[in-house]
Amino acid sequence: MEQDQRILGRITEMVEDERKLRESLAAGEIDSSTEHQRLAQLEVELDRCWDLLRQRRAKAEFGENPDDAQVRPPSQVEGYIE
């Protein structure tokens, strides 16, 4: 579960980074193009972290080793349909 806490910590950091980007745009410190580009990168990484965390939890729930979960490539994670 320590690994899960590290993943959650990283998610929290990225959510804070998103907030800071929005504030920087509002303050005129960056332009909207830069904000959109950085937000898009953050969103992909957030999706990958959430995916890894879900994989780990599912493996634990079904008696498998959560450490066998792997970070999936953006193309796979971003291809999910909700």
Image (tube, rainbow, N blue to C red):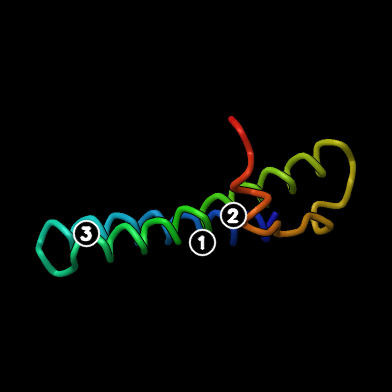
Q: Earlier in the sequence, mark 2 or mark 1?
A: 1
Q: Amino acid at mark 3?
A: Ser
Residue nearest the viewer, comparing 41 with 23: 41
**The C terminus is located in which quarter?**
top right
> Could you say whether the residue bearing mark 3 is in a helix, strand or loop?
helix
Give the Cα separation between the discs numbered 2 and 1: 8 Å
- Badge 2: how crowded within 10 Å, few (<14), some, or many (20+)? many
Could you tell me residue 22's position as x and y percent? 23, 55
Q: Which mark is residue 10?
A: 1
- Badge 1: how crowded within 10 Å, few (<14), some, or many (20+)? some
Could you tell me residue 32's position as x and y percent? 21, 59
> Could you say whether the residue bearing mark 2 is in a helix, strand or loop?
helix
Q: Is residue 49 left or right of residue 36?
A: right
Q: Nearer the viewer, mark 3 or mark 2?
A: 3
CB atoms at circles 2 and 1 under 8 Å apart? yes
Q: Residue at label 3?
A: 32
Residue nearest the viewer, comparing 47 with 81: 81
Against 46, residue 82 (above or below) is above
> Residue at horizontal 70%, vertical 59%?
71
